[in-house]
Image (spheres, rainbow, N blue to C red):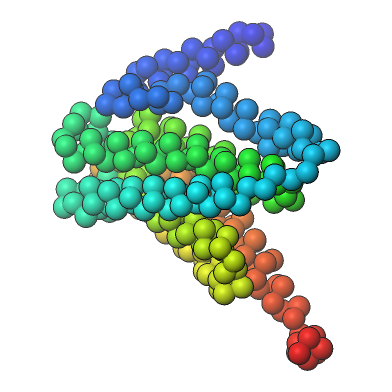
């Protein structure tokens, strides 16, 4: 019985990918094959949650400052360039809708193809983002491998792989455009902080979390638009998932923001400030 269910699900997914996959990007690596994506995510989770910490248990932390500085610079440049390209070929074009952008696999115009290839570049950056967690493990900062951190990185790869396979150039594009902007700012902060300017940048760190909250809040409204009114016939089920997912992410980031900046600040009483002065 179990074998039959697994086989049924396998052929169901295979047929769905074959029938509804976007032929414009089907030739690109890591697009259109759910099993490879899940396999890579499985390797990521196995390393950061089990094998990596176990391997590092009796080793000294790696000194990765220079490596991470180069990594952060690459992220700033890549995210910044793709943000400019993505915004230019989508929401700055009169033919691209802010309120309801449908799925059209037949659109092979130069504008749309540039959008798709920029989206693919964004998809590849989600795999590069996984190095964030790998660096944490190699530096033995395992307390930073939180549920929010791992869920966000793994969930983004799975979600963007679905977007690239079925929904390229559609209403979901806004998520990538905003996320590219947020990551440009975030990795710029990481790079500057690595140069020893951390104390001067503490205010920036809080603003990045606020920017992330703004991102999830706007995307919640963005997906709600096509649930309430859907003239472009965007898949409502996908919009509903996007709506719920962004509410979930907003709530988790808000919980982090409240515990880190609001509740902790309240604990700094006038008496404790006097003692520290």
Foreground pick, 229 / 70: 70
Foreground pick, 243 / 144: 144
The residue at 74%/31% (across/down) is: 51
Q: Is residue 246 visible?
A: no
- Image quadrant assignment for residue 138: top right
114 relative to 17, above or below: below
Name the side, left or right, on which 176 lies relative to 92. right
The residue at 28%/23% (across/down) is: 23
The residue at 37%/44% (across/down) is: 172
Name the side, left or right, on which 245 lies relative to 231. right
Foreground pick, 143 / 134: 134
Name the side, left or right, on which 164 lies relative to 54. left
- Image quadrant assignment for residue 160: top left
In the rendered image, the quadrant that contains the N terminus is top right
15 relative to 137, above or below: above
Location of residue 142 in the rendering, given as x and y in whole percent from the top left corner: 74, 47
Name the side, left or right, on which 43 lies relative to 190. right
Location of residue 251 in the rendering, given as x and y in whole percent from the top left corner: 59, 57
Q: Is residue 13 visible?
A: yes
156 relative to 33, above or below: below
In the rendered image, the quadrant that contains the C terminus is bottom right
Foreground pick, 253 / 48: 48
């Amino acid at each position: 019985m179990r074998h039959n269910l697994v086989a049924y699900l396998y052929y169901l997914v295979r047929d769905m990918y074959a029938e509804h996959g976007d032929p414009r990007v089907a030739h690109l690596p890591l697009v259109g094959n759910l099993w490879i994506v899940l396999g890579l995510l499985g390797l990521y989770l196995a390393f950061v949650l089990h094998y990596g910490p176990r391997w590092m248990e009796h080793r000294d932390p790696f000194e990765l400052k220079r490596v991470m500085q180069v990594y952060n610079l690459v992220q700033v440049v890549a995210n910044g360039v793709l943000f400019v390209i993505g915004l230019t070929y989508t929401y700055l074009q009169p033919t691209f809708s802010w309120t309801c952008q449908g799925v059209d696999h037949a659109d092979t115009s130069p504008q749309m193809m540039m959008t798709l290839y920029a989206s693919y570049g964004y998809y590849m950056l989600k795999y590069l983002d996984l190095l964030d967690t790998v660096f944490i493990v190699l530096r033995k900062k395992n307390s930073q491998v939180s549920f929010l951190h791992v869920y966000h990185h793994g969930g983004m790869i799975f979600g963007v792989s679905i977007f690239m396979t079925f929904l390229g150039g559609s209403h979901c594009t806004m998520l990538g455009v905003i996320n590219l902007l947020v990551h440009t700012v975030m990795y710029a902060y990481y790079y500057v902080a690595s140069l020893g300017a951390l104390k001067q940048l503490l205010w920036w760190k809080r603003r990045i979390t606020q920017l992330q909250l703004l991102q999830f809040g706007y995307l919640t409204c963005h997906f709600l638009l096509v649930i309430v009114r859907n003239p472009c016939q965007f898949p409502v089920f996908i919009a509903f998932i996007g709506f719920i997912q962004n509410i979930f992410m907003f709530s988790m980031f808000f919980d982090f923001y409240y515990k880190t900046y609001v509740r902790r600040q309240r604990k700094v009483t006038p008496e404790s400030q006097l003692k520290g002065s």
